[in-house]
Image: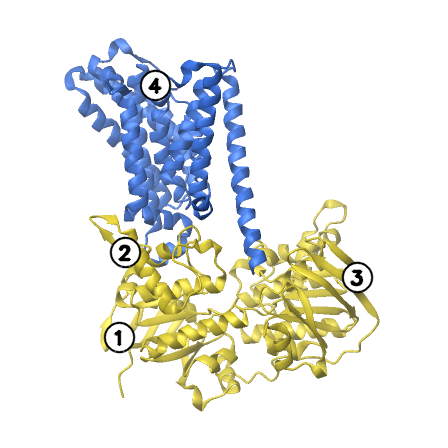
Amino acid sequence: MNSWRHATDTQRRDVSLAFLTLLLVGLVTLEFPGFAAPRNLASVLDDTSILIMLALGQMLVILVRGVDLSVAANLALCGMLAASFNRAFPGAGVWPVLLLSLSAGAMLGAFNGLLVWKLRLPPIVVTLGTMSVYRGVIYLLSRGAWVNENEMSAAFVAFTRARLLGLSTLSWLAIACAVAAVLLMRRSRLARNLYAAGGNPEAAAYSGIDVGRMQFIAYVVCGAIAGLCGYLWVARFAVAYTDIALGFELQVIAACLIGGVAITGGVGSALGVVLGCLFLGVIRSSLPLVGVSAFWQMFINGLVILAAVLLGARQRRHTRSILETKA
Amino acid sequence: MQAPLLRLTGIRKSFGGVRALAGVDLELRRGSITALLGENGAGKSTLVKILTGVHQPDGGTVELDERAIRIPTPTAARDLGIGVVHQECLVFDQLTVAENLFVNAHPARRGLVDWRGLQARASAALRELGADFGANTPVGSLSIAQKHVVQIARALVNESRVLILDEPTASLSQRECAELFRIARKLRDAGRALLFITHKFDEIFELADRYAVFRDGASVGEGSLDSTNREALIRLMVGRPVEQLFPKQEARIGPELLRVEGLGRSGQFEDIGFSLRRGEILGIYGLVGAGRTELAQVLFGVERADRGRISGSADIALVPEDRQGQGSILPFSIAANIALPNLRALAPRGWLRRRREQELAQHWIQALGIKAQGPSQAVQSLSGGNQQKVVIAKWLARKPAVLILDEPTKGIDVGAKAAVHAVTSEFAAAGNAVILISSELPEILAMSDRVLVMRRGRLTGEFPRAGATRENLLRAASDA
């Protein structure tokens, strides 16, 4: 227990969240023994993969005191681009599609980032605007029409569903992103500078960090991930239309907050975010089992966020009172 | 004689049409601490920003080791060996001490941060300074004084040869100051050149050996501190002799206005009792963290006491220590700020009378000599001293019987200070009462009719004006 006392707030939070997630899995399994079966857990991970990737991108933006409300719209637009490209060049294979969605997403992210960096507009306003703009562009591009599975090439659809060691490509991508994020957030200079820029922008500027550029980079990476997820989403559900992933940005932000990312910037860990996503994923897949309607899911998401914020606030008060008695 | 380590000649800088520096000269020598003096707006901050690469000068030369240099970015300043301890404690609360020292300069191996090397170097720097906290401590849990040490350690790991201390003592207690000075002397003796910016004359004579004075963006004097004195320095800063720094009017002490008995609030202060009478200025002296601010908040009613009684029917007003955060609404105009506690008078039946609001503001701008273009100027565009006058005006306009001033002259310049003291004294002489909380001994000694001393949340001394001396106040306030 000594190591528990020496752990940082973030570490404690991560452990609690992991414990809570396992507890939830355990409780559901008591009632429905099939829930903890490897096959089912693999499908829960598959269902949560896109959320994990998006949340890791969103984390970067929130760390530097921004927010990206346009991720879901970005995803939908890049998904539509990928599907349209595939319809036009069905024989081109998956790689050009991956490249296209990734770079299109990065450009949409860069547009957000430039507005925030160069024009110094508030992130919430910028991305609220581009959220609608990007959705609007999908409509203009598709004229409201759907791209259905019969218009997609076999390779296009098969990519996300291929399995290796029992896990889907989608799951492996999410795992790769998570591992890379955990390593890079801890050990790359760029990421450490992101923490600094979000933690105290003024001090960061005096340390020679260009805070605006940090924000720009965060938006580009977040956008690129959203673009990639656009293709993955469209291929997985085998349909592209204007309204896919409508409102999904809120789940992504929620996952970040549950995972311990501070909305005020500068605090958060990749591990925490992944755990936050898994927690939401387990809730989402167990609700239908225990007979709770999907409509309750939003309500429960909300409760979890409020609980997480409340716990965070209590923790802060706690640490402060320790300091005051010491002084 | 050896050439100075850093020499600035004819540095000029304008922002828009406003000239901040009109050609200043400054020399920093190895193994020497130079005090930089000047009223707010004299150009000290601009100079610091030029030396740290935040701003570029419009003209003039900067020489380091007799070679002309340019400081295009903060990174360049760091690489040249110029470090700074910022007044506002520019540190990263969420990061550990170790990482704070190396932000944007993380030692890396194969592109990845070398945490072990970083830890080791940070610990070594902290040891060298004799710091009482470890490299893994989150900076957010440190005191302001410790955060200053973190900034000094940062300069140390960057191998800074020039260290700028920008008003580092503004919110430090006596003991913390002593600790900071010990470190500063150590760095001086190691041959570094230090620039020490402060408003407190005692500290200048205690720590520095040379001085430089700026006035209105120009150098007006420099030399050895041995050959000058406090009055001469003030004359240089202000450009005229300041007749009386603490103009205290004699007041007749009248009947009791306020009585406090056995007042306590858990973890903050205990067993506080005193009475306050008409015409009186009651000084409360103590170190930072003695519970003075908390007591003021309870007297004013922002916080509740756990124990004890406050009796008396006086209206109480509080001018808080944090004038920007708690005392005013910065983006609002002077008129709107003064109107805030007076809305009932200005807005009978719920409608705000704009004319009356403007007249009220105009009256106080004149009465307190607030330097502003007019009542509609935003408070954030005023200097610190004038902001403080606005905060005082908004409460005086309510005509309270008791005015609590919490560190009313912290960080404001000599002229504004004298004005604040004059208003305070006049207010008390008119038959009201003042509680003056201050960490500045000369201010307490000169202004108070009676002084209470607090230490660790308790009253440890009460001295009438005649019996209050520097020595017995300090003794009552410190643990020794």
Residue B269 picture location, percent across and down: 67, 61
Task: Give the residue at mark 2.
Answer: B117
Task: Give the residue at mark 4.
Answer: A38
Q: 10 Å neighbourhood of mark 1: few (<14), some, or many (≥20)?
A: some
Q: Chain of mark 1?
A: B
The N terminus of chain B sits in image quarter: bottom left
Q: Which of the two marks, 1 or 2, is nearer to us in this view?
A: 2
Q: Which of the two marks, 4 or 1, is nearer to us in this view?
A: 4
Kindly report the distance in space between the C-alpha atoms of the residues bearing marks 2 and 3: 62 Å
Q: Is residue B430 left or right of residue B326?
A: right
Kindly report the distance in space between the C-alpha atoms of the residues bearing marks 4 and 1: 70 Å
Residue B209 against residue B308 in the figure, above or below: below
Q: Furthest-right residue in view?
A: B255
Q: 10 Å neighbourhood of mark 4: few (<14), some, or many (≥20)?
A: few
Residue B331 visible at all: no
Residue B58 picture location, percent across and down: 32, 68
* Precedes in sequence: disc 3 or disc 1: 1
Q: Which of the two marks, 3 or 4, is nearer to us in this view?
A: 4
Q: Secondary structure at mark 3?
A: loop
Which tint is chain A? blue
Task: Give the residue at mark 3.
Answer: B314
Q: Quadrant of residue B135?
A: bottom left
**Which of the numbered marks, if any, corresponds to residue B63?**
1
Amino acid bearing label 2: Gly
Q: Which chain is yellow?
A: B
Residue A2 visible at all: yes
Kindly report the distance in space between the C-alpha atoms of the residues bearing marks 2 and 4: 42 Å
Amino acid bearing label 3: Ala
Residue B303 against residue B126 in the figure, above or below: above
Amino acid bearing label 4: Pro
Residue at image coords 23%, 73%? B68
Q: Secondary structure at mark 1?
A: strand
